[in-house]
Structure formats: C-alpha cells, structure tokens
Amino acid sequence: MAAPASVMTGLARRLVMENVITEATANDAIAASAREQVRLTAYLVAKGLAKPLDIARAASLEFGDPVFDLSAMDMSQAPKNLVDEKLVKKYGCLPLYQRGRRLFVALTDPTHQGALRDIAFTTQLSVINVLVEEDKLQAAIDNTYKNMSSLLEGADDSYGDLEFEGGEESSDEGKDETARSGEEDAPVVRFIQKMLLDAVASGASDLHFEPYEKVYRVRYRIDGVLREIARPPVQLAKNLSSRLKVMSRLDIAEKRVPQDGRIKLKLRPGHSIDFRVSSLPTLYGEKLVLRILDASSAKLGIDALGYEPEQKALYMEALEKPQGLVLITGPTGSGKTVSLYTGINILNQPDTNISTAEDPVEINLEGVNQVNVNNKVGLTFASALKAFLRQDPDVIMVGEIRDLETAEIAVKAAQTGHLVLSTLHTNSAPETLTRLRNMGVPSFNVATSVNLVIAQRLARRLCMECRKPIQVPAESLRQVGFTEEDIAKGFQLYEPGSCPKCKDGYKGRVGIYEVMKVTPAIQRIIMEEGNSIMIADQARAEGFDDLRRSGLKKVMAGVTSLQEVLRVTTD
C-alpha cells in the first residue's frame, strides 16, 4: 500500500505537486531507487517515468535554484582531477569550475547532502551546488571521464596501488587495528592519496600532518617555505595517522615512540614516487612528516643547480682528482644531498667503484654500492668506512661526518688514494675547516686532505611571469654588499609579484654557493692554526665568492630578489 503523500518531502513531494509523476509512482520510485542504490532522479529518467527538464524545473521551484544548461558550457575547462572519478559517478555530481575557495558542483537533487559533504572534505573547498538536468549531467560525466589521463591513470583507491617498503612488523594488536583501518571511510583513503599526489604535482619536498587540540592541519613545504594546505576535521586525526602508518608499514599499535618507514606510491607502470615517513608522538596525537624522495633531482646535472661558471669549474676539477676530500656544507634543507648525488652521478662510470654510507639511503642509484647506516646493530658511518677501505674503492661518499672517528677515517682514505665526498653542518666554507680542527683532526691532516669545500643555500626563484622591477638607493645597495663596480655597471632589481602560475611571486628554487678551493695560501693558514675569519679573508683575496656575494650575483641576473638573498645568507 502506497504511503500517503504527506510523508513525502523535498523533491519527490514537489514532483507530485507539479503533476510530473503520480503519488503512487513517487512512492514506488523511492522504494525501488533505495533498493537498487541509485539516485531518485537517475531512476526516474532511466525508467522513462519523468522527463529530465520537468524534474529540473520542479527542483528549481522547490529549492529556489535556477536551472543551469550544461550543454552551453565548455566542459574541457572543468577541473577533472579535483574530485575522484569514482566519487563523481557514485553520487552523480560533477565539478564545473573553481573560484577561489569555492567549488561549483552540478547535481540534480540539492538534498543530496552526502555528496556535497564528501566533496567538501576531499577538496577542502566550500561547495556550491548548481542545479542541472539529469540527462545532460550524465552525458557530461561520461564525456569528461571518457579518456581522462591523470596521475591516477591505471590506479584506484585500493592498497594494491601502493607498494610498502621497510618499517617494523605490526604486533597482533596492530594487525587487528590494521584490518580495521582497511575498512576506513573511502573519503579518508581518497584524501590521503590526494594529498600525496597534490604534493608531488606542486613540487613540495615535505608533507606535515599535524594534530592539535581543536584543529588538524596539513602543510606542504614548497620552495623551502611551509604552507597550510588543508584542515580536515580534527575527529579524523586517528583515521588519518592510522592510514599513513599502514601505508608505510609502521606499527600502528605503538603510539608512544617515534617510528620511521617508507611509502612507494606507484602512479603508473614504470613510474613511482618514494616517501620517507617519520611519526612523532605529540600532545594531541601523532604528527607524521613525509619527505618526498625525488630520484629525478639526483639526475638534474650540474648545470641545473645554479653554480656560477667558475664555481662549476672548481667542482669539476675536484671531482677529476684521484684522491682528496670534497666537503659540502650547509643547514638541513639546503640541498647538500642533491649536490652530493650530482657529483656521484658524474663519477658513476663502469670503471669506477663507488661506495656510499648514508643515513638513510634516500635515492637508489644503479651502479653505486649504497649502505644504509644502522646504529642499532653497530653499522655506523665509521664502521662502514672501515669496510669500504677493504673493498677496493675508487670513490667513497659519507652521508655526514658527525664525529672524530668518522672524520679521521675519511681523512685517511683521502690521503691514501681515494676520492671522498661528504657533508658537514656548518654555516660557511671557512668554518668547515676550523670545525674539523675543533673535532680533533690535526691541522696538518686537514690542510693536506681537503681539496674543496662548498657551502650552499637554496633561494626561491622569482616567477618570470609576474616579477616587478624596483628601484633601490645606491647607499642601500652598498650596505648589503654591492660593490661600486656593480653600481656603476647598473642592473635591474626585481621583487615578487603575484599570478596564478606561482606561489607568492616565487616559482622553484636556485642554489647559492660558496665554492672554496684549499690553495697553498689557505693551507698555510690552517697549519698556523688560523681562524675562520683569516681563511675567509684569504679566500676573498683569491677571488672566491662567499655566499652573500654569490647571492647578489643571482639578484643582479634577475633570478631572485634581494630580500630572498638576505633571508638565506644572514647568519
């Protein structure tokens, strides 16, 4: 027996009131569409019970929204990758265009709040519904996704798309929780995958998933600067952290100590992205940071790194030597690893035996023997170096010189016919030499083993599309380090602008380098226990640019802004 019309609400009631369908048809259609798990509007059109335009007009009367004619829109401009195709087809809704933080979505029944909530969550945008006709919506969906190719090509939301490497095996409790996490709501799974893919597409180096008392935020580090990207509901903090820990094969039952893992995200056959994952217990839950390990950055080539011609020549000269120590220095995130890998790639030839000790190995290089340092089992930088010397090496790379033992073995290797590359955490090239002395390496060994020291920073590149010329008084230019010769020659300074193609007027990064060759004069200063200021003065006298001078050259070339150089070169 049909239910009375009085229990009908929303669109179904309006369809009956406007005589589009009868009361009996409405009740039957409501029951049948629920049973078949399809939308009411799609069911009515598919069964020929109502015309799409009549349904749209009734919805317009009921909800006060105008009917938009989809056939008049160029769907090639629609944001295809913003909402997952499965979500679009499940709910029968289609993103039309984005304006700022608002996303306009076509649908046939504005009461379909589940669709709007899921889209708002996965996109982190405010969703505005646009009323359209059912047949035109289905045609637009079919046409939009017919031959769509994107980063998700050949992938779906299952765990099969993600290959997991490393991590500890979960406990039984953890396995139970892992099984439960496999039953997470689809929006959480899609949200995580979207965050990973968006980070790769935007050129981010790190992703931060951070829980707080009343908010949960996701930030990307793009061009060296952290930017807030999304604020999912704080109630989902545990779901998000569990999903990430499952993907990286961490023990999700263990929430009291930090853990490290890896994720390999397979985008399509032959193309995958690696993430290094670190979890940290905080006051309101686990913070997870994902470092994107971009193998392509190790193969950029030295010309893409931003060395001045004379600096490049010094680096290449040091790499061609059969022995000696090449040190690359700078703070965390200054691009030391890329410079090291670039040098290793240049040296990676069939007739060269290369061994590296890293903590951890970030990028796999074919033809290079890479060792992952593991202090828990006694595989330290020092013990790896000792083993290398018994392996007939030509080139040795040490991820970082952290202690006297490692420094002494590296120096010994450099003095006995091996080329050694490594890093130190110091602010400038001259300070690197005095740091080795302070660690306990004799001055004679420092002077005779170190061939070249490179100090570096990464500065944001100005967007060439929107940079704006500015005028700066000559006195101000002198104060920051420009010479009278620079000012006499004349040059144009630029400041960041703003355009859709960039982030805050910057796009990408460029290296700023201090490349200092250890010359006989510098060797004498080291032997005489001279300090870093004396070494720096001698380096300038011999024509080696310090970081500030190297950065100012980038400013004069219009590559970056003066404020950016001052930001990264001020100690």
Image (cartoon, helix red, strand yellow):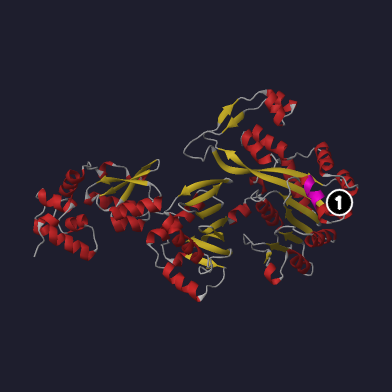
In the figure, is residue 440 to the left or right of 150?
A: right
> Pointer 1: residues within 10 angstroms few (<14), some, or many (20+)?
many
Q: Nearer the viewer, residue 186 or 370?
A: 186
Say if 450 sits above or below 385 in the image. Answer: above
Magenta span has 244? no
Q: Position of residue 47 (x, y in %)?
A: 16, 59
Magenta range: 430-435
Q: Amino acid at mark 1?
A: Ala
In the figure, is residue 209 to the left or right of 25?
A: right
Look at the magenta stretch and give its main secondary structure.
helix
Q: Position of residue 55 (x, y in %)?
A: 17, 49
Q: Nearer the viewer, residue 327 or 232?
A: 232
**Residue at (17% x, 44% y) in the render:** 61
Tell me the quarter of the image containing the C terminus: top right
Q: Position of residue 472 (x, y in %)?
A: 63, 25
Which residue is the site of mark 1? 447
